[in-house]
Each structure stands twice: as structure tokens, then as C-alpha cells.
Image (tube, grey):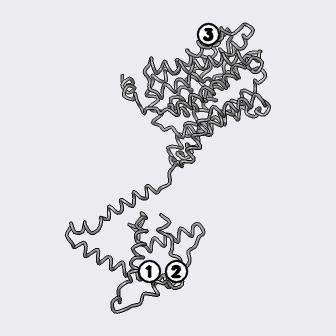
Amino acid sequence: MPASAIAPHRPVSAPAHLASHQSSPRTAGRPSLRVAGAFALRSARLSACPLSSALPENALLRLRDAGAGLIGVAFPAESPARSHLRREKREWRKVRAQADDSAGRAPPDERASEQPSVGAERAEATAHLAEAQPADEPAEANRAVSTLVTLFPLWVALACAAALRWPAQFVVFQDGRFVVGGLALTMLGMGLTISVDDFTRAVLMPRQLLAGVLLQYTVMPCLGALISRCLPAHLSAFATGLVLVACCPGGTASNIVTFLARGNVALSVLMTTASTLLAVVMTPLLTSLLAGRFVPVNGAALFMSTLQVVMLPVFTGTLLARVFPSLAHRLALFSPVLAVLTVALIVAGAISASAATICAAALPLLLSVLALHGLGFAVGYLLPRAALGLDESASRTIAIEVGMQNSVLGVVLAMQHFPDPRVAAPCAVSSVVHSLLGSLLAAAWRATPVPPHAHAGREAQAVST
């Protein structure tokens, strides 16, 4: 209710317009013109309130007093002068009712020319109230969030530089509980932006899902094998680590980057889950064929980790968005900020764990990892877009899924199954490189609008056939 509709008149001891109004033979039994003007102004104020059409003014004032009592505010008692003014207002109400009744007996054309209809007045008041409602997303908050998200590559680069300079300060971010908890909380924010229809639409588009999973386990392992052959013989440990990270499934951070790049987050989650489940077989098999070593993988632990970090938080966020849509809408406004902070800290923790090894052979290591992920992003976007004819949103999603790997899994496998600590170095550098490249793509793609369902008809036809 607007404040002007419930604000009381300023209490005065003796209103001048009442003191100056004296009864006379001409004005006896009629309210003063000043009282009539005051009542007309009061009626205009109350007409802006949606309850004014259903409740009288006395009831509105009682609601005002009751609401003020709930927040510990009390209005002063009504003065005798105010009571007299109220009585005169009631008299003026009777006079206006008689005038309205007289106007009602006039011809329709004459009534229409005298005053607008009540429905038009209420429609105008409703439109005015709709314009006066505060925006759900304030412009200042939108600008701040947009600035933080756009500068995502800068925050990741600063975190990497700080981790190389002061690695001991980032040991706390190497804790598995922080990584799992941070990504789970971030994925909860992602789930707030997803509806059940998004998952249904992703499942009903098998071409995108199948293309992404196939490219994940063909493009990246082949690129890793080719680039590793270009490294000198004394860097064979780096070559093994490069093949290992190329054979890993898509990383959970790809879901975050997909969200920032305005991709299909639901499709990204499904692709990450599918590639992770297949990693139980594909990662050790491909690594054994391409690197000459067999790498066992704990499939049950890998599945539980994916379930905890990706599936459960996303489904929880989707459920919250369905049950509490208004709250979910406000929380989703700031979820990209949480995503930026989480990714930056996780990358800093990974780089601090191998800071000495990275500094020892920085150039060949960095170039090989850059070539792996750069070509992965490019091929992952061009093949679905040009060869398969997929839409822009799906092509972005597949490119991010193919280009970004589960580097943390590669670090763990390297530390557990390879005695040379240098094998884990490409995996640690990979976590930084694909995050930087992915963040740059996210910043560029976020500024480029995605045509909504540009190829929806083609996809629906493909599904039906």
C-alpha cells in the first residue's frame, strides 16, 4: 500500500479551515468547500490502494493501525478537530453519492462525457502500481555482478600468480573437503537456474549428448598423443602426464563455465556425468594404449564423487527453484560471483601443489598444455557446429566439455600410480590453462547473445525420426 494512502494528517490543535468555517443560512447542512477538497484529495490517494475498491476508509485506517502495531509504531490519538473533519467527510460522501446517482440517470453519452468509467480508473491505478513496483534485479547489483563475471579471467590469473609466488599460503585450498564443498555449493547455484523442462529437453536431444561424449574420448586423447610425441625424450614424464589428462573425463568446472558462457547447463551436467561414468573403463584403457601404462581407477569412488559434487546439488537447486521460485530468482542473481570465486581458489590450490616443478620446465610444459586445450576447444566447437549442424548453445556446451578436463582426477591418478612426481605437473598446469581459456571463452560468449532455440524444429524432427 502506498505511504500516501495511509499517512495520517499532521495533528493540529485547531485547524484553520475549520475555525474559519462558520455556519450560515447559505451553508447550513452542507459541508465546506475546503472539506470537500480535502476529502477529494484523500479519496484520490486511497484510490491508488488495491484494497480501496473492497474496503471503506475506516477499515483501511484500522488496517493501518494494526500493521503499525506489528512493527512497534503507534499513531497519535485522533483529536476532536480530526473527528469533526471526519464527520464532515461523511456528509460530503452523501452529497457525492447523490450527485453520482443523479449522473446515473443521465443519458449514456452525457455520463461518458462527464467522468471516466470506474474500470478505466482502476486499470490506470493498477498500471501505475505495476510501474511503481521495485525491480527484482536492481540495476546496481546487475552491473556489479556483470563486472565481476566479465573479469573472471583476471581473477583466475591473479590467483595463479599468487599461488606461484606464495604456494604455502594456498595449501588450505588443496583440501578435498574444500574442493568438494565449494563445487557442490556452486553447482547448487547452477541448479537454481535449471528447470525440469531443461533436463527433459536435453534428454530428448540425443545427438548433442552422443556427440559430446564421443568427442570427449576421441578428440582429446588423439590430440594428447600427437602433442606428446613432439616433446623431447628427457620430458617423457611430462608426455605421460599430458596423455593422462587428455584421457580424463570432462571436469565439473565445465558446468560452471557453461553457465557463464550462456550454454546449455543441463546438457553439460548430463555430458559430465556420462563421461565420468565411462571414465571407469575409458581412462585406464586409453592411457594404457597411448602412454604404455595401465592406470586403475576406483570407479565406485569416482561415481560417488560425481554424485556428490554434480548431480545432488543440481537436483537440489532445481527443486528449490520449483518450490521457492522467488527466492531462487534472487539467489541465482549472485550465483555467478560464487562460481568465479570457487574456480579461482581451486585452481590456485592445484597450482600451488606443483609450483616448483612447473617453474623448472615452464616453457615446454606450458606450450604443450596450451596446444592441447586450445585445439580441444576449437575442434569441439567447429565439428558440432559445422559437421553436425547443432545449434549455438549446444556447440558452446560441447566445446567447453571437450576442452575442459577433470585435471584434479589426473593429478590424483598420477600421484597414486606413477613414481615420478613430474607426471602430475601437466595435470596441475592443465587445471590452470583450461580454466583460463574457458574463462576467456565464457567472457566472450557471455557478451554474444544466443538465438533462443534457433534449431528447435530441426532437433525435434531428428528426435521424431
In the foreground, 48 or 38:
38
Crowd band around label 1 with a 10 angstrom C-alpha radius: few (<14), some (14–19), many (20+): some
Circle 1 residue: 86
Q: Going by the image, does 408 lie left or right of 317?
A: right
Determine whether label 2 and label 1 are within 8 Å by CB.
Answer: yes
What kind of element bears circle 2? loop
* Residue type, mark 2 in image: Glu
Quarter of the figure with the C terminus: top left
What kind of element bears circle 1? helix
Query: Residue 336's image quarter?
Result: top right
The first of marks 2 and 3 along the sequence is 2
In the foreground, 459 or 436:
436
Whole-number angstrom distance, CA of label 2 to CA of label 1: 10 Å
Vertical comparison of 143 with 88: above or below? above
Residue that protrudes farthest toward the left in the picture = 107
* Point 40% across, 76% down: residue: 37
Circle 2 residue: 78
Number of the label disc, if any, that sits on residue 226: 3
* Residue type, mark 3 in image: Leu
Vertical comparison of 128 with 183: above or below? below
